[in-house]
Image (cartoon, rainbow, N blue to C red):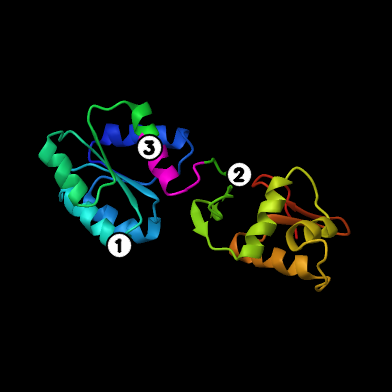
Amino acid sequence: MVVEDDKKLRRLLELELQHAGYEVVSYEEGFEAIENFGTDKPDLVILDIMLPDTSGYEVATELRKLSPDVLILMLTALGMKKDKLTGFESGADDYLTKPFDTEELLARIRALLRRKHISISKPLVVGKLEIYENERRVIYRGREVELSKTEFDLLLYLAKNSNRVVSKEEILNSVWGIDYYGSDNTVEVYVNYIRKKLSPEVIKTYRGLGYKLVEENDETSN
């Protein structure tokens, strides 16, 4: 999450962070960021202090109340010692003054995320679907989708093999394990669970052959 009132700088930060493999949401005002924090659930917040509606110090304090574990990096033109101390006291994990070097900012972000053991790898993308394997997160058409462990494992396996049709036996062996003795229609049941949560067209059934994860412009049918 980026909270910065300077439009050009906010856009620059968005582009640099996206290029580095991060998913980014941004806000011009502090109260807007606080209001959307619970929905966005960011791992890290880049926060300006001089915002149009409130101070970054107040925003940091409120965000820390909402999530004690969120990482907060203050990025501001206020570089006096007292400003930095106030920033840390309000909940900041790091403090970088403007003007700043982009590489240094990215290095500080990586260091903070390593400290929290949060993956920064790019997602596995198939069409409109983004899968973050280490975080076990799924984004479909821009919205996050909650999947069970088995649903996620099945979707991930199909995504890693999206260039081909995968048989039911391969799926059972890889997702449920070679010693699985459950129902013969287990795969079909979980495929339908995923379709209900994403889209009926996201997984195509090839009768007698198996299943394939398809992109938006692929021919689709169930």
Q: Which amino acid does label 1 sit on?
A: Leu
Most common SS among magenta residues: helix
Q: Nearer the viewer, residue 147 or 212?
A: 147
Q: Nearer the viewer, residue 121 or 68?
A: 68
Residue at point 53%, 52% (across, down): 135
Residue 194 shows in the view: no
Q: Position of residue 158 (x, y in %)?
A: 71, 52
- The C terminus lies in which quarter of the figure? bottom right
Q: Where is residue 67 in the image (x, y as percent from the top left)?
A: 33, 60
The residue beneath circle 2 is: 124
Q: What residue type is labelled 3?
A: Glu
Observer-side mark, 1 or 2, equals 1
Tag shown at residue 2: none
Observer-side mark, 3 or 1, equals 1
Give the magenta part as a residue range.
108-120
Q: How crowded is mark 1: few (under 14 residues within 10 Å), some or many (20 or more)?
A: few
